[in-house]
Amino acid sequence: MDMTATGLGEPLLMVPGPVPVSAEVLAAAALPPVFHHAASHYRLFDETRAMLAEILGCRGSVEIMPGGGRLGLEAAVRTTVGPGDRVLLCSNGFFAGWLEQIARRTGAAVDVLSDPPGSPADTARARAALAEAHRGGRPYRLVLAVHCETATGTVTPLRPLGEACREYGALLLADAVSSAGVIPLDMESDLVDLCGTASQKGLGSLMGLSVVGIGKRARAAWAEESRPGCDSFALDLTRWRARPGDPTVLYPVVPSPTLVLALHRATRLLLDEGLKARFARHEAAAGAVREILAGAGLKLFGSSPTSGLTTVELPADVSASRVQRRVLDEHGVLVATGMGADVQRLLRVSHMGLQAFPEPLRRTLGAVLGVLAEEGVPVAGPAGAATPGTASDTTAATASGTAAGPPSPPEFPEFPELSALPATGTPETPGTAGAGA
């Protein structure tokens, strides 16, 4: 499977977004521009919303907004709370910190329950805080939680939080930016009222669209006549309602029809594979990757890992950014470092969507383990041996008195642990889109 099929020298993206996208998605994005008020585009737009509702397990409504996942999350927060409201944030990593900043800018009072990165949010502590606030006559209106903290790959169970929110009258908003389409998520059964995700991760499409799932409890809370409206024209989700067949009902901001076409194809491909099959493939990939890395003697990070991402804690004298740079420069593979305070400590390998197949994983793991071995990390097994095309080959050639010549294409270990994965995904050759971590 050639993951750099576009021929422009892009790296193999093994970061948790943007992910490689299929040729079918790229082809959809390459179609001629369409009029954003055409009846045919409205039909396709609503088909996309319906497929997203199935993926999110949302029985309310799903809205597609322009921008990244953070924009949809901010819209959900700003539509729900304002000055005088109380917000409870379950924080266990970098992106929870962004949710805190969003919530504080609304003027709401924000209380933070902090847990260390790599640990799921303490849902029992959140329940106790909700109960105490309710008894004191100042209940929380909104609880914020990150379903999968992308900076560490840590998953927090949502159902216990949802049960506590229902008991004490709060709404639950879940950041599902790196969990939707990657691990099981069902807003209805998990009792999630608001959910935000993005197009370029588990949904397998191009970057540029935010997706918000809106439950019926959230719509009812927004309809309370005594509450002031959201102070934003574009981010007020009460304005983002499904058109009842009336072309005069317009959205505040129009999402790019080209990106909607790509997302429509990506969600169709996801549902054609089947959610259970997709999740099972991610689980198999995660199991194989972790077996390989742990078997090589590396330390896996986190106590509640997602199946879409594996995080490794490096020795204190090894720089994650240096390893990332060498893996990219020498092998054409982009992996992710940690974020914030953990930027030099953690290294992350993504395995969601088209990443979760043997060829990209074999290439990625061979590159990472080879570079780590050359950086002095004691890597166990044959994976630590220098691979052709690395600096070790040039050194050996020079020592023997022969000309080094051009580097050979790397020949990575086979990693039999990957043999249980399906060999390929779609019949079409996947391409790449962007190169960010």
Image (cartoon, rainbow, N blue to C red):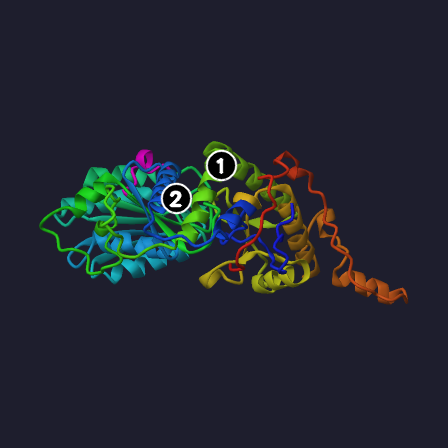
Q: Is residue 367 above or below residue 283?
A: below
| Residue pointed to by mark 2 | 156
Residues 95 and 199: in front is 199
Residues 12 and 185: in front is 12
| Residue drawn at the location 52% of the way across and 49% of the way down | 27
Q: Is residue 405 left or right of residue 221?
A: right
Tell me residue 112's x, y (percent). 29, 55
How far is the residue under mark 1 from the one under mark 2?
17 Å
| Residue drawn at the location 48% of the way across and 46% of the way down | 204
Q: Quadrant of residue 42?
A: top left
| Residue pointed to by mark 1 | 279
Tell me residue 378's x, y (percent). 68, 54
In primary-sequence order, the first of circles 1 and 2 is 2
As drawn, the label of residue 166 is none
Which stretch is magenta? 186-193
Sort mark 2 into few (<14), some (14-19) or many (20+) by Cα contacts within 10 Å: many
- Mark 2: amino acid: Thr
SS under mark 1: helix
Tell me residue 356's x, y (percent). 57, 43
